[in-house]
Image: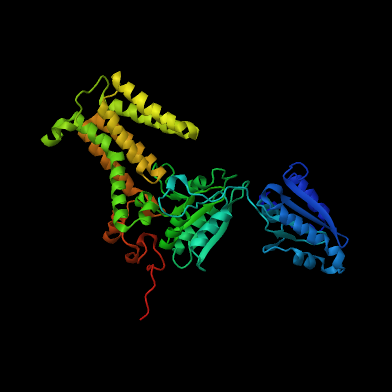
């Protein structure tokens, strides 16, 4: 049935077109489906559009131009050519099947049918509702651009091209979803990105079979990636055009999904999720310092709690100089249980802050910090050290630039606390080893997740640990297999 509909030719009589539109689209039922029939040189001309996705001023102008044909033209035989020349717009296309004409109309274009002709003229006058580009909340910088991607795919591709005015930048448009027909754009530099990587991503997107992707980019990600249940993010999301453009220059591929303000960067490693634009808006020394502090914070969010739990339950592992680390009073509840309760409480607070209006979020934080924490200590539910180390661990998770990575680290942190509390030193060692082995075996589109640490690449590892000055970064990451490895052209003598 689907194949028959896609091959349905456009009927020559517009009355049959009208019947088709009413039966399949419900033109006479849905209020947002616009329809107008006019007479041009004694022939019926029908126009179909979606009111909320079109710029109505353009439609009014086109109608005016078509009606004026009756005053200045008389050659009925060349009516299609006359109408096409009168469509004063930069993008006009002929389509020959009803399914294609309907798809274009539902995407925000207008379809014009001429009685006696077996094609439709499709004019791009779409004007999607949305907000203006603004700085994303999760990727703020002190210095730098304040624009960000929006839910409009046309604006998003324009924001990218504004930063890369290269003739070799490609924006390939695909459609996903049998019902939603969502626009998905594949962006890459033709002479830099690996062709095998482009073909692999395109093949997996084209193989998506689903009614619709209302959750936009996240749904596309789950179809693209092989590890469906991995807690760790295998793609990187960004809402900053400058970050996306920088990854294009490195040889990565972008997946831009309409209705989503986030862009998917492929492929990515674990260390991509630890980068932040702020490092590149400061001097290399300050950027390296910020990066080092961030690594320490991420390490603390993962291993601080299980380490302190291990030392507090087995003080013999501590040297004499660090004997103060253990708690003075273990309290009424086992320390491991206290940690789990505190971590669960932190998640309660985080989720409640998300669903709390901004005006009340500050009050919620004060109540949680001052009342709940202090009262829990006073009644003997928690000891002060547990509150301290749980708070440090929470701060470390918030320092992590990638929200997805910080959430995955929280899950691992809880598992390590459980293993350490149940089995002591052996539980901690087994937990850390299992965590590292899991990361080693992860791959993002055949890219090792821990590269350049495993497999080890000393030059690339230096760039991970230190923010190297841009004039010295003259090669692209080898892990994406770029066609052109050198970022800076060779100077002619």
Of residues 2 and 424, the one nearer the viewer is: 424
Q: Is residue 263 left or right of residue 71?
A: left
Of residues 170 and 139, the one nearer the viewer is: 139
Q: Quadrant of residue 283?
A: bottom left
Render colour scheme: rainbow
Q: Is residue 266 left or right of residue 279?
A: right
Looking at this rendering, what residue extends furthest in the bottom direction? 493
Is residue 7 visible in this depiction of the protein?
no
Q: How many numbered marks are there? A: 0
Q: Position of residue 132 (x, y in %)?
A: 56, 50
Is residue 44 visible in this depiction of the protein?
yes
| 344 w.r.t. 434: above or below | above
Q: Position of residue 217 (x, y in %)?
A: 51, 47
| 221 w.r.t. 157: above or below | above
Of residues 72 and 429, the one nearer the viewer is: 72
| 75 w.r.t. 238: above or below | below
Q: Position of residue 276 (x, y in %)?
A: 38, 51
- Which residue is painted at 42% across and 33% down in the image? 350
- Which residue is painted at 32% across and 24% down in the image? 374
Q: Position of residue 320 (x, y in %)?
A: 11, 34
Q: Is residue 457 left or right of residue 76?
A: left
Q: Quadrant of the C terminus?
A: bottom left
């Amino acid at each position: 049935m689907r194949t028959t509909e896609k091959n349905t030719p456009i009927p020559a009589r517009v009355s049959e077109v009208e019947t088709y539109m009413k039966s399949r689209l419900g033109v006479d039922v849905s209020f947002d489906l616009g329809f107008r029939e006019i007479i041009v040189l004694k022939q019926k001309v029908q126009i179909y559009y979606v009111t909320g996705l079109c710029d109505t001023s353009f439609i009014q102008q086109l109608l005016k131009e078509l009606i004026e044909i009756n005053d200045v033209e008389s050659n009925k035989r060349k009516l299609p050519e006359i109408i096409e020349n009168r469509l004063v717009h930069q993008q006009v296309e002929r389509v020959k099947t009803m399914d294609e004409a309907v798809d274009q109309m539902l995407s925000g274009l207008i379809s014009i049918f001429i009685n006696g002709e077996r094609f439709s003229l499709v004019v791009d006058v779409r004007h999607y509702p949305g907000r203006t580009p603004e700085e994303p909340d999760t990727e703020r910088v002190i210095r730098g651009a304040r624009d960000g991607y929006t839910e409009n795919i046309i604006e998003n591709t324009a924001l990218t091209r504004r930063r890369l005015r290269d003739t070799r930048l490609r924006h390939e448009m695909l459609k996903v979803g049998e019902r939603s027909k969502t626009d998905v754009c594949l962006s890459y530099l033709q002479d830099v990105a690996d062709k095998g990587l482009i073909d692999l991503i395109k093949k997996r997107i084209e193989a998506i079979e689903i009614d619709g992707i209302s959750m936009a980019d996240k749904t596309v990600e789950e179809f693209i990636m092989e590890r469906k249940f991995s807690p760790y993010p295998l793609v990187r999301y960004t809402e900053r055009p400058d970050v996306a453009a920088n990854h294009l220059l490195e040889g990565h591929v972008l997946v831009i999904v309409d209705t989503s303000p986030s862009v998917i960067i492929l492929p990515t490693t674990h260390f991509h999720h630890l980068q932040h634009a702020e490092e590149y808006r400061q001097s290399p020394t300050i950027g390296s310092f910020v990066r080092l502090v961030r690594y320490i914070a991420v390490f603390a969010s993962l291993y601080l709690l299980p380490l302190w739990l291990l030392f507090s339950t087995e003080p013999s592992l501590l040297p004499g100089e660090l004997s103060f680390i253990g708690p003075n009073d273990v309290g009424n509840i086992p320390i491991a249980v206290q940690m789990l309760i505190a971590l669960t409480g932190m998640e309660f607070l985080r989720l409640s802050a998300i669903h709390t209006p901004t005006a009340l979020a500050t009050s919620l934080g004060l109540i949680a910090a001052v009342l709940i924490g202090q009262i829990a200590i006073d009644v003997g539910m928690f000891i002060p050290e547990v509150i301290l180390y749980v708070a440090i661990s929470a701060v470390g998770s918030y320092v992590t630039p990638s929200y997805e990575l910080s959430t995955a680290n929280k899950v691992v942190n809880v598992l390590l606390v459980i293993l350490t509390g149940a089995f002591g030193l052996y539980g901690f060692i087994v937990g850390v080893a299992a965590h590292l082995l899991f990361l080693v075996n992860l791959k993002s589109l055949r890219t090792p997740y821990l590269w350049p640490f495993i497999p080890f690449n000393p030059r690339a590892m230096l760039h991970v640990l230190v923010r190297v000055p841009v004039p010295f970064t003259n090669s692209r990451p080898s892990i994406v297999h770029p066609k052109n490895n050198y970022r800076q052209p060779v100077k002619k003598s």
